[in-house]
Amino acid sequence: MSHKDDVKEFLTSRRARITPEQVSLPGGPGRRVPGLRRTEVAMLAGMSVEYYAKLERGDLVGVSDTVLVALADALLLDDAEREHLFDLSREANASPVRRRRRQVPKDVRTSVRWALDGFTAGPAFVRNGRMDVLAENQLFRGLYWEMYEQEHRPVNLARFAFLHRDLSERFYPNWATAADINVAILRTEAGRNPHDRALQDLIGELSTRSDEFRVRWGAHDVRHHAHGDKHFHHPVVGDLDLVYEAMEPMGEPGLNFLVYSAEPGSPTEESLRLLASWVATKEREREQEQHHADRTEAAHHEEPA
């Protein structure tokens, strides 16, 4: 899909979701299109119908920030949608010389890993906009144990949600909500960094292999994933009701540091203690098995011919 198509479908979908009543316009029967008419958006944004039609055809070249703000106000865009509109405009107006792929961090600093390891009250991890998990603490590995059992590295939250449905539908009590969030984050990243080849490959893979992803991708929803509630059903410790906070490490644009916490004194807090003990045991057993396998292989190579 071309950049103009992305702009067109984003603006069209935002216009279609707004009712006349939401913007104090008369509604009533006989409307042949969902949401607002182009003439109504143009009036609300203070521009001509012809100019708005040009924008909705995907042409954002030369559009000023003032016009973008007026359009965002008319379409009742939230903060994430406004930023996405500006990202789309920035890409449309970038010169071929300046239009280049923004580098997506592939690793995290050692000090960030130490900070993750030092947080033991709940799961914590660092991900990029492609939903690749780049670093995590032991509790996060325990929480997403079944994801880490898969061969693909780095582990990817969107790939787990859509391509391992038998596992993810049991893990997420509200799978549809989790799926919506994953796609909205990927769509946001695609607006920020449209030339990221690895991101485009992931979107292509998910679109080809998952009808659920393809439908959601076509909705053009975007999201800032800053804080909120998380609900999981772990195969060992059962239901977990957590809250999360997301932060962007200074000097590492494109990365998110997320921490999950339980309400003090809650059943989930006790379940996290059980999970911590369980995953520590599992990883210790795995290390012992690997150590034994390495010693066996070394002894085999030392045998005389």
Image: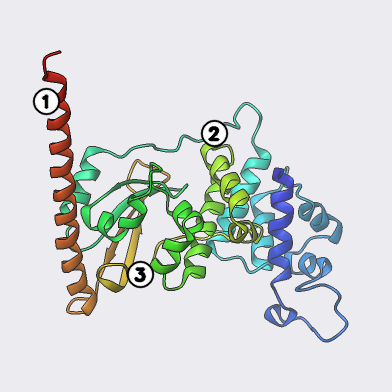
**Residue 301 position within the rendered picture, expressed as x and y whole percent measured from the top left:** 16, 20
Q: Counting other residues with Cα less than 10 Å from the Cα at mark 1, is it few (<14), some (14-19), or many (20 or more)?
A: few
Which residue corresponds to mark 3? Answer: 232
Asked whether 14 or 302 is in front, the reply is 302
Which residue corresponds to mark 2? Answer: 101
Name the image quarter holding the N terminus: top right
Disc 3 or disc 1, which is closer to the eye?
A: 1
Q: Amino acid at mark 3?
A: Phe
Which one is earlier in the sequence, the residue at label 3 or at label 2?
2
Residue 269 vs 142, above or below: the answer is below
Q: Is residue 287 found left or right of 8 in the rendered image? A: left
Res 295 → quadrant: top left
**Residue 283 position within the rendered picture, expressed as x and y whole percent measured from the top left:** 18, 50
Disc 2 or disc 1, which is closer to the eye?
A: 1
Asked whether 51 or 280 is in front, the reply is 280
Residue ID at (88%, 82%): 30
**Residue 252 position within the rendered picture, expressed as x and y whole percent measured from the top left:** 36, 42
SS under mark 1: helix
Which one is earlier in the sequence, the residue at label 3 or at label 1?
3
SS under mark 3: strand
Name the image quarter holding the C terminus: top left
Disc 3 or disc 2, which is closer to the eye?
A: 3
SS under mark 2: loop
Q: Is residue 193 visible?
A: no
Cα separation between marks 2 and 1: 49 Å
Q: Is residue 204 visible?
A: yes
Asked whether 30 or 147 is in front, the reply is 147
